[in-house]
Image (spheres, rainbow, N blue to C red):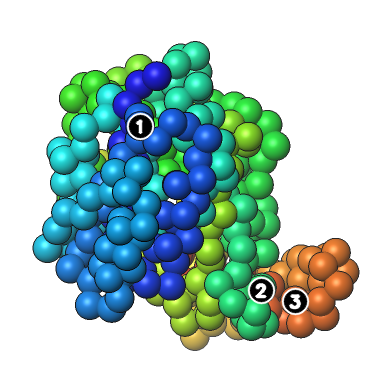
């Protein structure tokens, strides 16, 4: 069996780091062939203390911490890859919890040559039991919220444009290069673009599963999707041909609202169009909220799901446009 290095960028993750480490310890893949390399951005909470306590109680699993003074995800990933000793790399995040067969299934898919980078589906869960957190978790896996991002909801194994937490060989990094440290977000997608441009394949297997904890309130969600939109636009300047419809719709929607509001100064009909467009969007959001509310027997989702989806779309679209205009 090939040696596997699980790499984890991390900063102030005291609430979830032990969940991740326990899940890695529970993997069916032999621990003798497994190591964990955590690139920590010099955490100021109890993250390092918890990792140290875990190391002391689980000496049969190699867990190493390296410093990531830049405190960015791509720099942490690159440092972890350089420090890793495994033939295969499995990338995870500190707020994820992989299923027990996660590593074994990733290795199997790579050995079967199903893809050059392989990954699975997120089971998105709320970080707490608050009404906002519950709505955000469901919105983040609803097709109206995330479009055709298959890794959030599909049951079909297939070639895709990107996967979260990819697994790949060290030789692939030597062929296409490391993660781009100029992109503070969207580094996974850009890495997968280079793989595809080099003739490689990105493979999504829904049997490869991990739990991902969504943001717990709308303010955090807005900041997250604002970052996504801003850095997506930066990436698309380099690779304009890689844009997908799910990425184009939010900025086009925001742009249409802004244009209609501007035209309303001179063209009163645009006010009516603005109202019709906004009302139609609100109705679709409400229907999504009602659907998930009935399915989950939670009436509060009627409000939280529409608010979460609108926050995702508006934050992403606005930041995308801002990034295009103000370079």
Q: What residue is rendered at 32% in x and 48% in y?
A: 59
Is residue 161 visible in the rendered image? The answer is no
Distance in Å between CA atoms under marks 1 and 3 = 45 Å
Q: Give the residue furthest to the top.
A: 112
Mark 3 and mark 2 in contact? Answer it, CB < 8 Å: yes
Mark 1 and mark 2 in contact? Answer it, CB < 8 Å: no
Residue highlighted by disc 3: 301
Residue highlighted by disc 2: 134
Residue highlighted by disc 1: 32
Distance in Å between CA atoms under marks 3 and 2 = 7 Å
Q: In this view, does 216 lie above or below 312?
A: below
Q: How crowded is mark 2: few (under 14 residues within 10 Å), some or many (20 or more)?
A: many
Q: In this view, does 45 lie above or below 153?
A: below
Mark 1 and mark 3 in contact? Answer it, CB < 8 Å: no
Q: Is residue 279 above or below residue 139?
A: below
Provide residue 264's location: percent of width, then percent of height: 54, 82
Q: What residue is rendered at 30% in x and 76% in y?
A: 46
Viewer-nearest of labels 1 and 3?
Answer: 1
Provide residue 1's location: percent of width, then percent of height: 40, 19
Q: Which of marks 1 and 3 is nearer the N terminus?
A: 1
């Amino acid at each position: 069996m090939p040696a596997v290095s699980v790499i984890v960028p991390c900063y102030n993750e005291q609430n979830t780091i032990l969940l991740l480490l326990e899940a890695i310890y529970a993997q069916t893949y032999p621990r003798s062939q497994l190591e964990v390399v955590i690139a920590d951005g010099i955490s100021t909470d109890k993250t390092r203390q918890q990792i140290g306590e875990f190391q002391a109680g689980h000496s049969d699993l190699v867990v190493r911490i390296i410093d990531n003074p830049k405190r960015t995800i791509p720099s942490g990933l690159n440092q972890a890859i350089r420090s890793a000793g495994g033939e295969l790399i499995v990338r995870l995040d500190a707020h994820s919890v992989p299923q027990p067969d996660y590593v074994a299934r990733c290795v199997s898919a790579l050995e079967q040559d199903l893809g050059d980078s392989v990954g699975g589906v997120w089971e998105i869960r709320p970080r707490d039991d608050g009404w906002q957190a519950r709505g955000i978790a469901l919105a983040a896996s609803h097709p109206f919220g995330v479009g055709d991002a298959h890794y959030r909801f599909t049951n079909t194994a297939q070639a895709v444009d990107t996967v979260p937490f990819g697994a790949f060989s060290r030789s692939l990094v030597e062929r296409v290069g490391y993660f781009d440290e100029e992109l503070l977000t969207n580094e996974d997608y850009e890495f997968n673009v280079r793989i595809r441009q080099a003739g490689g394949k990105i493979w999504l297997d829904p049997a490869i599963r991990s739990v991902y904890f969504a943001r717990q309130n709308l303010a955090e969600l807005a900041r997250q999707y604002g970052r996504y939109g801003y850095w997506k636009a930066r990436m698309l300047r380099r690779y304009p041909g890689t844009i997908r419809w799910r990425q184009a719709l939010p900025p086009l929607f925001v742009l249409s609202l802004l244009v209609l509001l501007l035209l309303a100064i001179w063209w009163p009909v645009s006010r009516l169009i603005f109202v019709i467009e906004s009302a139609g969007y609100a109705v679709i959001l409400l229907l999504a909220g009602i659907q998930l509310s009935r399915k989950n027997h939670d009436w509060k989702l009627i409000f939280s799901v529409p608010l979460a989806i609108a926050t995702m779309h508006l934050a992403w679209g606005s930041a995308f446009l801002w990034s295009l205009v103000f370079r």
